[in-house]
Image (tube, grey):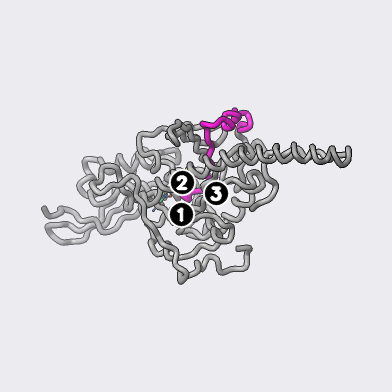
Amino acid sequence: MARGTSDISELDQEKYDTDEQVKIICLGDSAVGKSKLMERFLMDGYRPEQLSTYALTLYKYTTTIDGKAVLVDFWDTAGQERFQSMHPSYYYKAHACIMVFDVQRKITYKNLTNWYKELREYRPEIPCIVVANKIDADMKVTQRNFNFAKKQGLPLYYVSAADGTNVVKLFKDAIKLAMSYKKNSNNFMDEVMRELENFELEQKEESSDKEDGVPKEEKPSLP
Amino acid sequence: MEMEFVAKRCGVRFDPPSIVLVYEDGKTKKIRQRIMPVRNFSKYSDCSQAAERLKNNTRHRAYLRDVTSRQLERLHVVLRDRLLGRTLEQSLASLRLDPNQDLNKLSDEELARKKAQMDVLFERNRKCKDDPDFVYDLEVEFPEADDHETCSWDESEDGF
Ligand SMILES: Nc1nc2c(ncn2[C@@H]2O[C@H](COP(=O)(O)OP(=O)(O)O)[C@@H](O)[C@H]2O)c(=O)[nH]1
Ligand SMILES: [Mg+2]
């Protein structure tokens, strides 16, 4: 799956396990406005890190949450979306996903199904926000239900990278969701460990043949 | 101040490669045509630079004041496509936005053209930091009503 670019898995992503580093990925078809949204949030003058060998653009953002500095890496594709599939490392350790379509182009909405499917293959339960971009082009779309989001139980944001509507809110909420996912997924691991300890103790009393239930990195099923 | 020349329409002529402008002479109110040959232009030329060059040309610039750089660039793209052996139809299609086209399937250059097209509306609707009514954190609520019309995009069999 090299696709003429270097393998993203060479990138060090262990840092995303630490408390103060978060990874948020952007997904969606070509030209839906992923990069424009990033630029609107970070405003002009911001220089992202172009990792052209990985067909990847990294936007680094620092913020303070509960009095602690948090480093957010926003991952944006630089053409890899053309393959309508991303390298697994793109998803690796991501804490939240921003999934964008263009309200002027139905095909980008239809393709959400594929993006969402791929996302869930790699990250079964990270928070995901569906973004209807370019509402400035046709405000009437904000009167419409887009069933995809509802059906998947995902929040839907109506935004415009051009006039700025709801862009900052979108990114701030994505960071909050990513942070809470991070916290809760750690808690969840602790819970599992505790449960397992108890489980083993009980088992020992009854019989000696026990099944090994090593906790997976992720919960296997969707809520 | 009244415009000396009012641009009405523009187009291209392939041989020799030229930009054609139809304009109204502000004084005589007559409609006239001006043919501006594009010099030193090859299939390797940068269309946006070539467009700027023409727009700033001392002999032509008075006539081209109403014509945007973007439009001139598009005309140059059509000229260059011809030098690359593309038909006029192909060329125009690449400059047009078809909402049903899958843009994932385009080459870098083709995609850049589509984005340049999208940029027209983007720039028109854009709120910049320097605008007096600019709000960085612009929040607008679009309350969800039950009587929202269902998006017609959902009304099909394929999996939604
Ligand atoms: N009208 C309008 N156009 C937009 C908006 N966001 C992006 N665009 C246009 O869509 C094009 C593609 O955006 P880009 O961020 O490059 O898309 P990406 O391929 O998903 O990163 C841009 O060149 C803009 O012209 C928006 O909110 N409103
Ligand atoms: Mg982009």
**Viewed as shown, does residue A94 lie left or right of A206?**
left
Determine the residue positioned at 52% across, 52% down: B103
Q: Which residue is mark 3?
A: A128
Is A22 inside the magenta-drawn segment? yes
Determine the residue positioned at 62% across, 35% down: A4
Task: Report the Cα–Cα distance between label 3 and label 1.
Answer: 11 Å
Q: Residues within 10 Å of mark 1 (few under 14, many from 20)?
A: many
Check chain identity for marks 1 and 2: say if they share one.
Answer: yes
Question: Which chain does the numbered disc 2 sit on?
Answer: A
Q: Is residue B15 visible?
A: no
Q: Which residue is mark 1?
A: A157
Question: Which chain does the numbered disc 1 sit on?
Answer: A
User: Three-letter amino acid code at disc 1?
Assistant: Tyr
Mark 1 vs 2: CB contact within 8 A? yes
User: Three-letter amino acid code at disc 3?
Assistant: Cys
- Give the magenta range: A6-34
Task: Report the Cα–Cα distance between label 3 and label 2.
Answer: 11 Å
- Camera-near label (3 vs 2) is 2
User: Three-letter amino acid code at disc 2?
Assistant: Asp
Q: Is disc 2's CB within 8 Å of ligand 1?
A: no
Q: Which residue is mark 2?
A: A173
User: Total label count?
Assistant: 3
